[in-house]
Each structure stands twice: as C-alpha cells, then as structure tokens.
Amino acid sequence: MIHSLFLINSAGDIFLEKHWKSVVSRSVCDYFFEAQEKAVDVENVPPVIPTPHHYLISIYQDKIFFVAVIQTEVPPLFVIEFLHRVVEMFRDYFGECSEAAIKENVVTVYELLEEMLDNGFPLATESNILKELIRPPTILRSVVNSITGSSNVGETLPTGQLSIIPWRRAEVKYTNNEAYFDVVEEIDAILDKSGSTVFAEIQGVIDASIKLSGMPDLTLSFMNPRLLDDVSFHPCVRFKRWESERVLSFIPPDGNFRLMDYQVSSQNLVAIPVYVNHNINFKESGSSGRFDVTVGLKQNMGKSVEGVIMTVHMPKVVLNMNLTPTQGTYTYDPVTKILTWDIGKINPQKVPNLKGVICLQSGAPKPEENPNLNIQFRIQQLAVSGIKVNRLDMFGEKYKPFKGVKYVTKAGKFQVRT
Amino acid sequence: MRKAEAMSASSAYNDEKGASSNIGEPEYGHDPASGGIFSSDYKRHDDLKEMLDSNKDSLKLEAMKRIVAMIARGKNASDLFPAVVKNVACKNIEVKKLVYVYLVRYAEEQQDLALLSISTFQRGLKDPNQLIRASALRVLSSIRVTIIIPIMMLAIKEAASDMSPYVRKTAAHAIPKLYSLDPDQKDQLIEVIEKLLADKTTLVAGSVVMAFEEVCPERIDLIHKNYRKLCNLLIDVEEWGQVVIINMLTRYARTQFLNPNHNESLLEESAEKEFYGSDEEEKEEKDEKEEAAALAKRKPYVMDPDHRLLLRNTKPLLQSRNAAVVMAVAQLYFHLAPKAEVGVIAKAQVRLMRSHSEVQYVVLQNVATMSIKRRGMFEPYLKSFYIRSTDPTQIKVLKLEVLTNLANETNISIILREFQTYIKSMDKDFVAASIQAIGRCATNIGEVRDTCLNGLVQLLSNRDELVVAESVVVIKKLLQMQPAQHSDIIKHMAKLTDSIQVPMARASILWLIGEYCEHVPKIAPDVLRKMAKSFTNEEDIVKLQIINLAAKLYLTNSKQTKLLTQYVLNLAKYDQNYDIRDRARFIRQLIVPTEKSGVLSKYAKKLFLALKPAPVFESPFKDRDHFQLGSLSHLLNAKATGYQELPAWPDMAPDPSVRNVEVKEAVPEWTKCSSREKRKEKVEKPFYSDSEGGSGPTESADSESELELESEGGSGSEEGGSGSGSEESDEGSESEKEKKKKPEKIKVRKTLPESAESEQSGEEEKSVRKRKERNANSESSSEEEEESSSESSSSESESEEESESEPETKKKKKKISLSKLAPKEPKKEVSLLDLDDFIPTPSPQVTPVNNIVSNSLATDLQGLSLTDSALSPTMISPSFSSVKTYELLHRITGEGLAVEYCFSRQPCSLDPHMVAVQIQFSNNTDTEAKSLRIQEPKLMSGMRMQEFPEIEVLAPGETVTVIMGIDFCDSTQAANFQLCTQTRKFYVSIQPPVGELMMPAFMSESEFKKEQGHLMGMNEISEKLTLGEKCQSDHAIVQRVTSTANLSRVPCGSDREYRFAAKTVTSGSLVLVTVVTKEGMAAQLTVNCEKMVIGTMLVKDILQALSQ
C-alpha cells in the first residue's frame, strides 16, 4: 500500500521523509516537481502522478505537499483520505499543521506516522487511540520531561486498540461533564447577473465537543429530521437507529469530533440572506473603469449578518483601484489582483457600498468579462435550513451533564456572477 | 536540492563523503564494511554514541531523538547502528520505540548487525502481554533481513493461532511483509491466510483480506466459506479494512453470480429488433426466430441470496465519513447491482464532491465514467456540477466533462446557458475546454446543432485568439457533418485567415476550404494566393495544409490555380522540414501528370476528394469502466502494477453451495436473537483476552510440536461439520460410557460456583475436584486423540492458576459437546459453532459500564441481522393469574371491535407443532360485526398458521372466543396478518413471549439429570439472582416460573432446588430449568436448552419474574 511519505514545503524542499517498507530514494520527487512546474498553480497539481516505477499521490494542505509513494494498485481515495487523516492528526496534536510545527515536533511526528501505518496499511488512525500511545506535547509536559527525562510515549498499553469502540478511551474522568454541539450550516450558491439563484444548496455539519466521564450513551434527536436529505456519520453513530427512528444514537469519542455531515434536501428553497447590486464596467477607450457594488440584507431573519467579506479576482489588466467604502475597509493587491472588502456587520438601515475607479494598464484591450464576486458572511444563532435539535439524552451514566447546542450559518462557496 | 542539503550537513562530512554524495546515492547506498566511513564518521557522532552508551535513560532518549530527527530529514545515520542496536532491550518505552524505528529503517543495510536484535523480539513474542507480543512481531516482520525468514515464518504461524485477536491482526499484517521479502514462502503463507480468513473477529478481517489481496488474490476459492461471514462483519470492521474487503468482494461477486442486468440488455436488444423489424418486413420472419432464441435464452433472473446479502450489507456504508469507503461501495453497486438500484450511489458521490479538492478530483473522474453508462443516475444532481470561477482548472475540466455527459434533449438548454457563462471566464484553458464541450453537445444532440454552430461562429469574433482558434477547430468538425448548408460560415472563416494567427486554427480553416472548395469556388483560389504569399512564414502544420489545399484546388479548378500550386510545391520542396519536403514530392507525383507518373495519379481525385466520415466527439472516459472504478488504474486509464482485472460475469452461475456454511433459515434467527449475547461478549473481550494473555505463556512456552498439535486440535473441532460423519459412529459406541460418567460431571460443575462464592475451598476439596475433572477430561478425550493433547495441556496449566483455566476448560468442553451435537443436527451445527468464539459464559460480574454498552450496542448490532425487524424479547410482567391476555386490537382503533388474545397453553388440536392462541372478540358497537376472518398472513419463512373458522356474525355486546394455531418455528418473531370484518381491515400481529413457545414435558428426576448432562457447555446458561420480596415461598417461585413459561415441574429430592421441564413446540427440543435457592435472597437460575436463543431469552424472562 503506502510505501513512503515525503513532506515538501512551498520552496520545494523535502523536509521530512518516512518509509514503511524499503527505502525509496527521494529523487522520485523530481517527477512531482516536474508536474508542479507544469501545473503553474499549486491547486492544479494532479493528485495522482504516474512515474516509471512508482505512483505519487499527493495532497496540498497548509502550504505543504504530502506526497505518498505507491508501488501497486490501491484505490487513490484510500491514500488521499489517509493523508488527510494525517493532516488532521497533526493539527490535533500541534494545533496547526505548519512546516515549523512539524519540524519542531519531528520525533512525535515520526512516532505518530509509525503507529498510523504498518507496512503501509493503516493501523491506528483514531485520535483517541493515538493519544493513549503518544501523548500530545504541551508546554508543561515538555518542561517536566526535560527535567525528569520521562517521555511522551504512553506508559500504559493502548487497550482502546482492542476494544470494539476503538474511538473512545477507557476510563475517562471529568469533574465537569459537558456535551456541546455546534450546528454549522453553509450556503453554497451561484447567483447570476440579475441576482436570481442559479444554484443553491445548504450543507451542514454537527461538530461535537464532548467531555463526559465513563461510557455515556447519547441520543440526539431533531425536531425536523426530515429536512436532512443526505447524511454521513462518524463511525460511532448507529446507522440502524438512524434508519428506523431518525435519531443519532452513539457512544461518543472523547473530545472534539465531527458527528455528522448533512445536506438539506434540495426541494426546499434556500433563503439567500444577502443581495448584491453591482455595476462594474470597463471603458472601451481610455484605461479606466467604474466599480460600484452594494451588499445588502435580503431577508430579515431577525438576526444580524456579520463578518461579511467580499473578495474579487480582478482581471490581469487592472493595475489599481481607487475606491471609497461607506463601511468597512478594502484592500487591493496589485500582484495577485485580489480585491478584498471587509464589511463587517451589515446594518439594515445603512446599506454598505463600495464605489470608485478602476485603473487599467494603458494600451491593453479592455477585459471581456466582469469578475465574479465571492461573498462570505456569518449569521449567529441561526440554522438557515430550520433544523433544530430537539433533545439530548444520556444513558449509561448517572451524573447530569451540561448540554448545549449552538447554531451558525455561514456562506460556503457563495459566488455572484456579474 | 538534495545536494544542497547534503552540503549543509557537510560541515562535518569529510571529503570522501562529499564526493560520494555527488555520485547520487549518498544516503542509502553505504556499505558499512567498506572502511573509511567508520573512522571518519566516528568523530562526528561521537557524542551521540557516548550518550547511547550512558546509563541514563534521559541521555539515551535525547540521543535517539536526535538520530530519528536525522532519519526524518533523510540524512544517513547508519554508522550508528551498533551503538543503537545495543539499546533494543532498553526498559524505557520511548527509547525502545525509537530504537525500533531506527532498526526498521537500517536493518536491511546492516543485516549482520541486525541479527543481534532478533533474540529480543523472539523473547517479546512469548510475552504474556498481547500488546508486547504484537509489537515484537510487528518489528520482527518489518526487518527486511533474509536470514531470519524461517524465524519470521514460524512467528507468523504461531501468532496466527494466538488467543488475542490483536496479535492475529498483527500476524495478518506480517504476511505481505514476508511475502515481499521471499515470494517462495507463498504456499505456506496461503495456509496461514486461509486460517486467518476463518477468523471471526472484526479486528482481523480487514487485515487478512489485505494480506490475501497482496499474496494470493487469484485464490478466490478461499473466500467461499468466509463470504457470508465477511458480508455480515463488514459494518463493524474498521474503515480501511472495509475498503479492502469491499473491493475484494466486488471481484468475488463477479466470478460467482450472474449479471443482474443481463435480461435487461437482452430486452433492449429485442426491443430494438422489433423496431427495425417493423420497417423492413422481409426480415420479419428472421427476426421472429431470433427473438424466440433470445427469449429462450432469457430465463427469469433470480438474484442469488448471497449477491443480495452483499448489496444489502454494503449499502449503509454509503453513509461513511470516509470517502474511500463510500467510493468502494459506489463502485460495488456500479459493477454489481441491478440497474434499478444503482441510483442510490449518486447522492453519496455528489456529497463526496464537497470534500477536499483531491477527493473531488478522484470522485469526478469516476462520476465521469459512470455518467456515460448511467446518465439518468446523476441527472437530478446536474446543478451540483456547475462550475465556480474559484474551482481549480483540473476540477473545472472534469465537471465540464460530466455536464457534457449528462446533456440530453431536455436539459440541453440549461446546460448551454451555463456554458455561455463559462466561455467568458478568465481561465483560458477552461474556455477552450468549454468550447469543445459545446461541440460535443452539438454533435450528440441534433436539435441544438445549429444553435451551437451559430454561437460558435459568434465566438470567432472574440478578442482572445485562443478562444477563436478553439472555435475554429470545433466548427470545422461540426461542419463536416453537413457542409452544404453552411457555405456562408466557410466564407466567414476564410476571411479569418487574415487575422487569426493560431496555427491549429489556420490549419483547420485551410483544410475546410480545401475540403469544401466546391461550395466556395470563388474564394478558395484567393485564399491559396494569400497563403502562397506567406508560405515561408507559416508553421509546419499550416504549411502542410497549404499544400493540401493547393492539391485539392489543382484537381478541381486547375485553370485558376495551376501556377499557384506549382509555386507552393516549389517552395515546399526546399523547406527545412523533411515532412513538408516529402509531402510536396509525393503530391507533385500524384497530381501533376508526367510520363513517368504511375497508375496512382489516375485516382488522385478519388484520393484527395473522397468523402470523409464526420469525426466523432468521444468522451475520454468512454469505456473506462472496464477498469474497476475507484481504482488507480481507472484514474490513470492504464493498468497499474498489481491491478486485478474485474472478471466478466459468468454465463452460468457457479455452484452457490460452496458458500454454505450454515443453513439460511438458521441465519436470521440466530443473528437476531443472539445479538445481545454477542455484544456483551465483545465488550468483555479485552477483559478476557487479558486473562488469555495470562495463560498464554504456559502454552507458548511449550515445545513447538505441542503447539502445532493443539492448533490442529482446535481446527479439528472448528471444522466439526466436515468430520461429523466419522464422529457419529464414535459416538454410538461411546454413548454408554458417557451415560455413566455424565452425572459425575454435573456434580463437578455444580460445586464450582459455590466454592467460588464462599472462597473457602480447602486444598483437599480442590484436589478432589481436580481429579474428578481430570477424569472427565480424560473421558472425553478418548473420543479424539488430538483433543486429548490439548486438554491435558490445559489441565496442566490448571495447576498453576485454577481460576483462570476454568473458563478455558469449560470452553474446551463446550467444543466437545458441540461436535457431539453435530451429527444430530447438522443444519444448526455450524451456526452453533460460530458461537464458540463468543461463548458468553454469562457472568453476573459484568461491570455496569459494560452492561450499558452491551444494551445499547445491541441495537446497532442489528446491522448484522438479516432481517430488519427489531429484536423482540417481549417483557411479561409476572402475574399471578395463570393466563395473561394481550391486546390484539384496541376498542378504539377497531372501531368498537375489541380483540384480545392469550396463549391458552392447551395442546393445539389442529396441529401438535403449533402454539394454540385463544382469541376473544367482543363487539362493543351497536351494530353487528360480520364475517370476521384472517387475511394475508405475512409470516417469516417456515412459520405456519392455522386460521380460525370465519365468524359470520357477532352481535352487538356479544363476545366470541376462537382458537387458532400458529407455528412460530421456535422463534419469537411476530406473526403478522390482517383481521378483516366485512367493512374494515386491521393489521395486527401476534408476538409470543418465549415462554409460550414450549409445552410441558414430564420426566423423572433421573431423566432430568441425564438430559441435563447432554445439554452442558454452550447449551447451558446460568445466572445468579436475588429473589424478589414476595417471592420467597416455594409456592411463589413455582408459580412465577410456570406463569412465565409453559413448564412442568419435575420432582426433586432437594428442597432448595426447583426443576422444570418443557419441550419447544415446533422442534421438540428440551428446555430444562433449574432454580437453586441459597442463603438469604440469593438464587441461581440455570437453563439448559439446545436452542441457545430460546435459552437466553428464557433466562431473562424468568430472571425478571423471580426478582420482582
């Protein structure tokens, strides 16, 4: 299966290598660099690159390429999914997955990789098991370790690996027992020139942060489970119960995890909370253009829309932009040609507007098309689909936990065509 | 860059090292023996070596950390090998682990030195702790040193029969490692794989299938026996194992089952034939014959239940969070499911597209292939493939591909509108791809061809040259389909030659004009004139087309173009490019007649102006589905090393009985009802296996030969089914002996719990018991010699740890009793054997935590069950009335008709194998209820029902009682049926409490003991309980037990013991219940029953009745 792994930074340096079978020379990465050069953009590097003797399967996360070397047939998604798990694990352990963090914790990284694969086949990928085997580094522990010479390899044997609920540690104890759920929904939409919806859908996730002692068995039910069209679950969720009763019944992992992903059935009309009026044009003669964009609230849902940011990839010929916002601040990066307008919270009375002049490269033909506007926003305390958690019941433990549910709606890939 | 790194480190490297790094393989290729390196590097790693040699763990750890950091950066640390390997037995776990990391990395290069470490691992293999055994095996098998192959082989074999599933899993992982080291071991390894495939734990399943795929994917025959088990375990296997198993099962199913879509494809064919047939009447007769033949071929397709099992058990995994699992299920459905069912995978695939862009890329590739074959599947999700300007180009192009595949007459207008916006994108590569997509839509859908063509012509005036060029190329292809109608477009394009510079586009225009010069007779020579002028400055492909154009014009219109052609050909003759020179010579010979010109020139016109077939726009994903979807080979569209071809469906289904390990009827019952026990057992496993680990060393310390024997013995009893024939005869001869010894055995067993409780078992008693037990052991061992060796070995271990060996011997006995049972009930036998891995030995000391898990998990274990209806242990609240009535139809739902039923406990007069159910109708309305009867009983297979005679009239206020009989097949499945009156139908169901599935059996005390002796081991379930307050008197106990279940009391000498007996109604299996009261409120309940499911449920019910 997975033969070797190389981590490559944006400068093209291989800063970590790990082999699970016999050693593969790092020169194999030359094929990757070749492909990278050809692709120009990092995002266009093909995830699978065949070379004469190996296949390279890579992912790009946090400015690092994770390049896995494969020798024989293996489902590409298997490798890609695994590499993403590695990234998640690094984030879980070190708080971030940067080159600096990996270099700093290189021994822990190596120990992790050693446990995650055996002979290239995944062995332990559950965060709860790994944390029993290898304790995440903390400042306190590293100080203690350096004094006492003790290690961050767990002394106890990972019994979780043997259990049928491998995702949960045994003997969890908390003084404050809490179970919090975040229902986060994202609106993916494409609006056309006139503002009508070409495509819109709502997808959501339920992230859980569970700190409960013992072996709690939780049941989460919804007021309106019918809204959920397509779902995927953490392995802890009992699928049969979902099928028959539409409740989520599970013994949770300890700590933070994603309980479920869902999509709201497409029949429901998606309420688009904002509208965008735009007037962008480039003059035929002369090297300038006009830019006038207004972002406003469309439906008043009784909640304020905040964190509104608009980003625009301007055409290459745009040299600079001279604009005045009525609210928030804007920046234009003449190198990447990205205009960012940070609006903040939209006030229903005062509609934010950004207006001004576009300076074009003189002599160049005017751009043929107007750039698309990408919008981000956030609405607290609202799940736009209307999904509501009804109740959370706990069985199997006697204490009374604190429970809480938070709703947030965000813009996903929200694009306005102009 | 590697060089750079080597340089940066080279401050300490000596010259020699630097030199070798220039050669190319500096880090890895070192031969440790080739002097120099040692001496020079000695200085460099001096400090590290010192630290490693020190006594302080912290220093060692620090040194190892630095070394591992070196390895991680790809630097060579091989010269430290001797210093590091010394620490392999270090006490500090982290040091040890880092040494392992080092060892695995460098052992291959330093084989001799690596041997020093082997003994440590060999010791580790015998460690009582399963995790240490596993990790020793893991490192041992990862060291790629050929000398130790025999040791590895031995270790793997040993570990494959380890008690701990975790060690067995590690053994499975080790198999491919050894195989890659020495492929000659294949045969032996296959044996181990075969053994591990029979393993019933989810922990092992994924790993062993992975080993199977790497070592012997062609040995599909090994899967037969394990197929159903794998299907059933699948949902509980860890995600990575699921992927491997699903992919393997896809291949398996392709070889074993029939194509579920076979008939449909035949139908389609014949439908087409009919269609054509009506056009051409002469052919009709022939067609009819063909059709008849096709019909004959078309047998009614019935899906193999195993095929169905696979589809059903994989479907829930579409909801996995792991994209690889979802894709694996999707490809399984695509390759194996009937057309009508494939649709379910579309939604999951669309969901995957919201994941990371790499996942999106792979999924889109697969969707592209699927959407060609099954377009309808993705049509509802058309909009999910719309393209955003922020998508990476490679994703955009793939989405475009899918959109094009999905286009049809109904949605083409929406798609074209979408394409229109894409054409304006800033990403020019993407625009080019969009134009090609439009071209493909235009060729595929005739209705929009003109619209598309017009649209593309408009693009010709686009400012971007790339766009124009791409349009020209596409238009050229489109025009070829119907050139006559589009001479004005050709004219328009001719004008473009002045402005357009992209060679491919120019070449296309020239080719078009040449090809259709008859449609533009005036313009063509003029274009040639212009081209002749600029010939020398053109690109090669354009030059070739100019020559072509000249040749064609010369042939059609030689008067005007003769000189021009000569001129062009002369220019070409001296061109730098030999292709062009060649072409020029060749064409001159063909078209310009000379004396020497051969026969060919006569045909010049035919050669050049032949009608060319219009090009077909083909998706690059067409026919890619001959690769298994989701595979690397599919993605690359080329066979990757190690790819296993997806076999074609067989014409005739191979014998399905090869998969028979259990009879189908037994399956649902067993999996359902036992799920509770199973769960409990599973949870307890870590707990068990610890104690197993404890007793491990005594076994593994034994000589190998003994071990082998034992494993043989184990497998012997596991495969009881095959050996049952011979055993039967054995049994006959031995039955007498057994009879004598059996009571003794029982005594032994009975004394056990007591002594465990009171804890006052003196040495004497112990030894007596032991002797007795040994007797029992040796007795049973006379049946099978191999068995005896295992027995004796276990009884040896007894002397060390009494309490631990107890369950083990018990287990062994259970096995024996099982194999004895085998001949009696060959059908059941295997499913019984399945249990032996999870014998619950229901211990009351299960920790509360575990209990909870078991209860709650019981529900999701239903994933394993084959039927969807829920687990159904109906609770009976113990009542003192002898007969409890249940409501079948409430007065209100029944619109005034109330129906109650009770189990009358009378032998059913209609059929002795049926449970008599007394049904009482009462009419609470003020009108007559007419013709009350039963309709459409829906029963599980094997169940039967004897309906009561129709009640013609039920007067208001009146009550009528009837008896009906139901054969529940000894299961608590509900019997569902409709209760009809003249006007209404009510869906009702009768679900029997387990206690009603039996009828009293009368026997003497000695008979009871004898029968109980037969039903030991797995068939015995005992539970401790505390009697309820109101349940102290003899009378109350008997009353409660008999009201819970239809049992008869068996006389008994002791006044603290109560015995009851019954037979199940359908199969007549004995059910024996013993209640022993003890000091205070304590009591012990024992149920012996061949049907463990019934036994388990009965224990539960009686327990509840007694403790309330």
Image: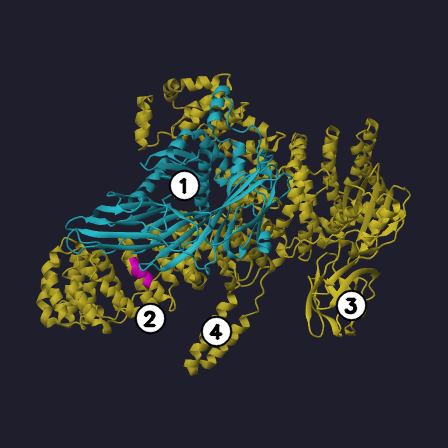
Chain colours: A cyan, B yellow
Q: Position of residue A314 (x, y in %)?
A: 26, 49
Query: Which mark sits nearer the N-terminus, 3 or 2?
Result: 2
Closest to the observer: B3 or B567?
B3
Q: Residue furthest right?
A: B1053
Q: Nearer the viewer, mark 3 or mark 2?
A: 3
- When asked about the image quadrant of residue B411, the answer is bottom left
Q: CA distance from mark 1 to mark 4?
A: 50 Å
Q: Are marks 3 and 2 on the same chain?
A: yes
Answer whether labels 3 and 4 touch (C-beta < 8 Å).
no
Q: Tell which circle, 4 or 2, labels the residue nearer the N-terminal end.
A: 4
Graded by Cα atoms within 10 Å as few (under 14), some (14 to 19) or many (20 or more), the crowding at tag 1 reads many
Residue B922's label in the rendered image is 3
- The answer to whether residue B117 is above or below residue B864 is above
Q: Is residue B918 magenta?
A: no
For the image shown, how many numbered marks are present on the structure?
4
Circle 1/circle 2 CB separation < 8 Å:
no
* Vertical placement of residue B498 versus A261, above or below: below
Label 2, on which residue?
Answer: B446
Residue at which label 4 appears: B270
Query: Chain letter of disc 2?
Result: B
Residues at discs 3 and 1 in contact (Cβ within 8 Å): no
Rendered image: mark on residue A69: 1
**SS under mark 4:** helix
Same subunit, labels 4 and 2: the answer reads: yes
